[in-house]
Image (tube, rainbow, N blue to C red):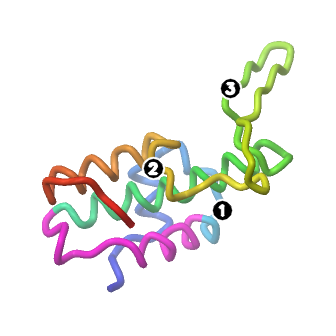
Amino acid sequence: MSFAINATTVKLRFKEFRYEADGDIEFAIEEANREVDPAVLGKDTNEAFCYLAAHYLMCEIQRRLSGTGQIISSERVGDFNFTYEATDKATRADPSDFSSTFYGSRFQKIVRLRTGGPVII
């Protein structure tokens, strides 16, 4: 199913993404579109969909900002102190780890409230 959510919708809802390229946002929307089921989420579908797209987008931003493909676990602007998340994987954030971003955690909360149980995607 296709939702009435686009790059502009995401940028309006999440101001932190206002400078992201529309194409990057649209890709995250396409990814989220495969995972959200309106039959399960009902009236919460659009909200859940936006948070899932934002989660996918943030995972990509985290990899891009690290410059190494690794996820930044902490940073300090003064004196440029960066710490990268240790991983056994090939330097890619795992978008299925919803706890890795605020948006993923919020998506999970919406789904849990609507379904009454844990989410397995």
The overriding secondary structure of the stretch rendered in magenta is helix
Element type where label 2 sits in the image: helix
Of the numbered discs 2 and 3, the one sitting upstream in the chain is: 3
Q: CA distance from mark 2 to mark 3?
A: 18 Å
Could you say which is closer to the camera, residue 2 or residue 98?
Answer: 98
Circle on res. 74: 3
Q: Which residue is mark 1?
A: 21
Residue at the (41%, 59%) spot, across then down: 52
| Quadrant in which the N terminus is drawn | bottom left
Element type where label 1 sits in the image: loop
Horizontally, residue 26 falls left or right of residue 103, namely right
User: Which segment is the magenta one?
Assistant: 25-43
| Quadrant in which the C terminus is drawn | bottom left
Element type where label 3 sits in the image: strand
Res. 95 image quadrant: bottom right
Horizontally, residue 120 falls left or right of residue 28, namely left
Can you give x and y, in whole percent of width and height, for residue 28 in the image? 54, 67
Could you say which is closer to the camera, residue 78 or residue 22?
Answer: 78
